[in-house]
Image (cartoon, grey):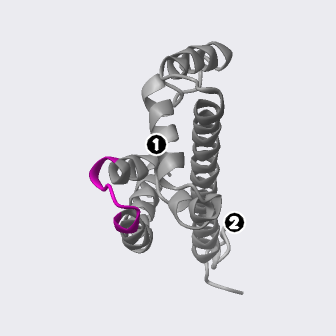
Amino acid sequence: MSNKPFSLVPDDYDQFLNKLKEQIRTTQIRTSLAINSELISLYWHIGQAILERQREEGWGAKIVEKIARDLKKEFPNVQGFSARNLKYMRAFAEAYPDVEIVQRSVALLPWRHNIALLEKLDSADDRMSNVNQIDTDDNQIDRNRYHSRERKNM
């Protein structure tokens, strides 16, 4: 007969639970990064579409305000389609005309970082140099912040 008290929880339960938590956190981070990448890609495509219409059909700056109003009407609970942000999307598409670069590098950065690069750096080479640096350094910081936030919520 064993002197060990009977328990409904297996001995390796803590290790098992920690493994599940880590899988959840890893998936949350990957999901967050995938959503960000899709959003940046959408913003680029919107900016590119506006640029094309302005170049080909001579659309003026006022059309951006109309697009913003119409998108707000269609998607009242979705943020990110203000006239100001649409102008950033246009500038973003103009700054990065190659969608491949956007998908490989720039889409890995949060939108606020992309806006900061557009506002602070005029040269495409300077922006790309910073994108590559931010991609390796800052995303790690963002992942750590996200990871820390999620631990607090669990």
Farthest left residue in view: 120
Position of the N terminus by quadrant: bottom right
Give the numbered dot on residue 91. 1
55 vs 115, nearest the viewer = 55
Decide whether the magenta segment is chiefly helix, strand or loop.
Answer: helix
Whole-percent x, y for residue 37 in the image: 60, 55
Mark 2 is on which residue type?
A: Leu
**What is the CA distance from the residue labelled 2 to the residue labelled 1?**
60 Å
Q: Is residue 21 above or below residue 36?
A: below
Quadrant for residue 135, please give it: bottom left
Residue receiving disc 2: 8
Q: Secondary structure at mark 2?
A: loop
Residue numbers of the magenta segment: 119-126
Q: Is residue 93 above or below residue 22?
A: above
Mark 1 is on which residue type?
A: Ala
Give the side of residue 8 with respect to residue 90, left or right.
Answer: right
Tell me what residue is drawn at x 63 percent, y 78 percent: 11
First-in-chain label (2 vs 1)? 2
Q: Residues within 10 Å of mark 2 (few under 14, many from 20)?
A: few
